[in-house]
Amino acid sequence: MFAVTILGNNSAVPAFNRHPTSQVVTLDGNNYLVDCGEGTQIQMINYKIRRSKISHIFISHLHGDHYFGLIGLINSFSLLGHQQELHVFGPSPLKEIIDLQLKVADTQLCYPLHIHTIREAATLLDTDKLTVKCFRTNHRIECYGFSFAEKKQPRKLDPEKSRAYGIPASYYERLKNGEDYTHKDGKVIKNEWVTMAAAAGKTYAFCADTKYDESLLPHINGADLIYHETTYLDALRERAESRFHSTSKQAALIAQKAGVKKLLIGHFSSKYDTLEEFETEAREVFPETELALEGVCYEV
Amino acid sequence: MFAVTILGNNSAVPAFNRHPTSQVVTLDGNNYLVDCGEGTQIQMINYKIRRSKISHIFISHLHGDHYFGLIGLINSFSLLGHQQELHVFGPSPLKEIIDLQLKVADTQLCYPLHIHTIREAATLLDTDKLTVKCFRTNHRIECYGFSFAEKKQPRKLDPEKSRAYGIPASYYERLKNGEDYTHKDGKVIKNEWVTMAAAAGKTYAFCADTKYDESLLPHINGADLIYHETTYLDALRERAESRFHSTSKQAALIAQKAGVKKLLIGHFSSKYDTLEEFETEAREVFPETELALEGVCYEV
């Protein structure tokens, strides 16, 4: 399953039992953490997120509500005996801050920690399942969004049919990659006779904190699901603009223009004690909008 | 009222719905925060602690479970429009860490923040109600405990009796300070005829993280209430020793030797899912022991 679980959907300060930003992207049993506001490790316990399955953390920017929980998580991983490598990606000087805090506590982590500095749009991770890229957003300080693109899987082989056509098992991998088979007598077995197309790889994009900016579109075009911040309702669009944030309608407009399938909205201002109005406003522009609610897992 | 409310009673990592160390000492409507583990600001919301009443924060040492929540709280104070000065006391390089995190976020606090570096045993605060002192404890890194001594209040005046003895109202303040009054004819009105002693000032001492060490005794002698850590049960006293922590029995022995009235124990290891055994073991040595439970307010 390819999905995203919301651990925090609030901006700036915790309020109304809403927590600062953090999400877990899950693909094939691996957890990728996106942002890590204060209390993220406690939210992980609340929502049964397996910390041991996290080997990559992506930090969008260095406003506290997006990373103050990171040092605690790094520390706890060690105290809990985490073994595997942990890779953290984030803008400078994240590494300096974490290194300083580990040093003053005289902490020796029991696992290898690699903090990678993001400086520009780039591919951060490329496995056989997934590509993660970052892209700049338009915020008050250096800030990055992240796209998670599932790789297209090999075609599904029908072993019975393959045997019936007399194709040797040693050729099966090439069938999965879409090749036809040619018998010695020149007779061609078309690939589609013995395989079925796998589902296309899906894409999730996290647009971080940003004001309305169409320069994001090329990075999220046609995504199956995007998350876009909606700190304010439409009535406060001037405040949104001046603080480098977006309104619900602006998020919806980006989703519409990017031709995505579904929009998740979050990063709600602590001004608002209820959230229905965000959904209502966004759906006027882009009906396939949902509120990012804490503890809920949204399939990509 | 002079009291302490526990916001976090666990050590190292959050577990079993227990949180890292933080306490609020309340005296005459002012809140003094002692340590500030991750999530402290959320615990304050849970337990209705008025953040606006906090103007002094004391950080014992720079292990994360005692200060990772501080930067978030400092940040939130500003976002919530805190006005009054905030004084933070802690060991070096706390100021450097906080300053760096504020700088990278381009944060301009809307209130004056003063971070004072503790270097040795000293008086940190001296008001007309209270004296706060710090003292070294014996931990793996530089670490301080804090004692909160309520000042003895002026004697209580009986105005009727004072009038009956013909003492002018202009002398009442001196009566409250314990002086006798002498009439022009030489007749002396004894202070105790017209005033009553106020209750003696009480003392609370927070002993931070520490291994068993009798050098703490002079700083906590005769206190009304002390908090002493008990990371481990007696069976793990060797582990406690090697990690510069204490067992429940050791905490109780310190309380007994210091002749304090009451002992609170906390900073429980995440090894333990229940706490009753800590209380049982400590009470064998010092019966007036209570578990420091989160959300509970203990009167000094």
Image (cartoon, coloured by chain):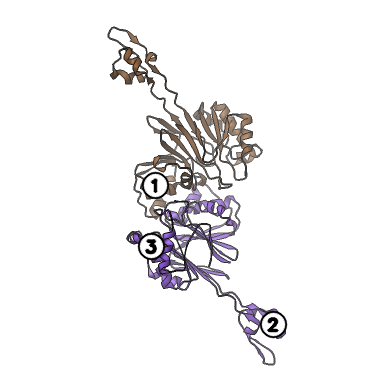
Chain colours: A purple, B brown
Q: Secondary structure at mark 1?
A: helix
Tell me the quarter of the image containing the N terminus of chain A.
bottom right
Q: Residues within 10 Å of mark 2 (few under 14, many from 20)?
A: many
Q: Which residue is mark 2?
A: A162
Report the residue at 61% width, 78% height from top.
A155
Amino acid at circle 3 = Thr
Circle 1 residue: B77
Task: From the image, state whether disc 3 or disc 2 is nearer to you.
Answer: 3
Q: Chain of mark 3?
A: A
Q: CA distance from mark 3 to mark 2?
A: 55 Å
Callouts 3 and 1 in the same chain: no
Question: Which three-letter amino acid code belongs to the residue tagged 2?
Answer: Ser
Disc with the residue nearer the chain's start (3 vs 2): 2
Q: Amino acid at mark 1?
A: Phe
Does B273 sit left or right of B186 as displayed? right
Horizontal and vertical percent position of residue B294:
53, 41
Mark 3 is surrounded, within 10 Å at the Cα level, by few (under 14), some (14 to 19) or many (20 or more) other residues, namely many
Residue toward you, A272 or B261: A272
Q: Quadrant of residue A278?
A: bottom left
Q: Is residue A173 above or below residue B290?
A: below
A210 over A192 or under it: above or below: above
Disc 3 marks which residue?
A247
Do discs 3 and 2 belong to a common subunit? Answer: yes
**SS of the residue at dot 3?**
loop
> Could you give the CA–CA distance between mark 1 and mark 2, rounded to whole angstroms?
68 Å
Q: Secondary structure at mark 2?
A: helix
Rendering coords of residue B228 (x, y %): 55, 35
